Amino acid sequence: MRVLLIEDNELLGESVEEYLSSYGIEIKWIKDEREVEYEDLSLYDAVILDLMLKYHPGEDILLDIKRKNPKLPVLILTAKHRIEDKELCFNRGADDYLTKPFEPRELLLRIKALARRGISYPIERIGDVEVDLKRGIVLKGGEEVRISPTAWELLVFLLKNRGEIVPKSRIMSYVWRDKPVSEDVLRTYIKELRRLLPEGAIITYKGRGYKLVEEFPPKD
């Protein structure tokens, strides 16, 4: 699970990051809320958002997040406890609201519940290949085919953005996080997927990125 934390309090942000990370949750912590507009929200399963920030009201950031990505769950974490504050946030699309001080365990349970709510587990079909997202397996002609963990991450991200041209930079940010990798490495794993998928399933857009076709075979 990947969570975007927007919190300008150093002590609280550090403790939330440390606690959630100890349970295997990958945290991207933004201390300056102005940086949110540069984030690719499709990389995250949920957002934890403070309301009282330095430069912009959290309520406005909530509205912007929901406009860009309506399905991305947002949990408000704030000292504001009036019913009017909660009403405003829920009207702007908040999925949950937790007031400070709080029990870290409760935050963990709530964010896990939100992430599960935002995730569906269909069986995706690409020609004769089935991708079972719930079980984490790939089937070809009814037989399980093993692929590398990195190729799996790449396949899931392409499926998440199926029918769209996905820039190479976005793919590398999702699959390799902050690890520096070259485009040659990305091409290696694209080749691994092409050996698995039907011909023409992944289209290369030179200088731009890749697209997993929405329908297969693709229409002329």
Image: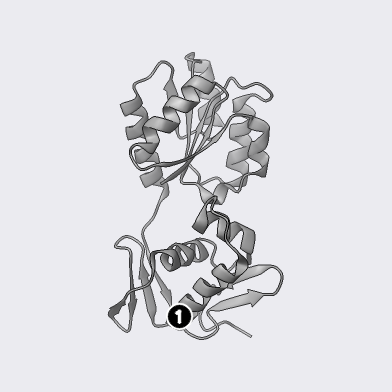
The furthest residue to the top: 82
- Residue 182 in the image: state x and y as whole percent: 60, 64
Location of residue 103 by image quarter:
top left
Q: Nearer the viewer, residue 44 or 12?
A: 12
Q: Which residue is mark 1?
A: 197
- Residue 197 in the image: state x and y as whole percent: 45, 80
Q: Secondary structure at mark 1?
A: loop
Residue at image coords 69%, 67%? 208
Figure disc tally:
1
Q: Nearer the viewer, residue 202 or 153?
A: 153
Residue at image coords 63%, 38%? 36
What coloring was used for the rendering?
A: one colour
Q: Is residue 201 above or below residue 170?
A: below
Left-right relation of 1 to 33 = left
Left-right relation of 173 to 150 = right
- Residue 33 in the image: state x and y as whole percent: 63, 31
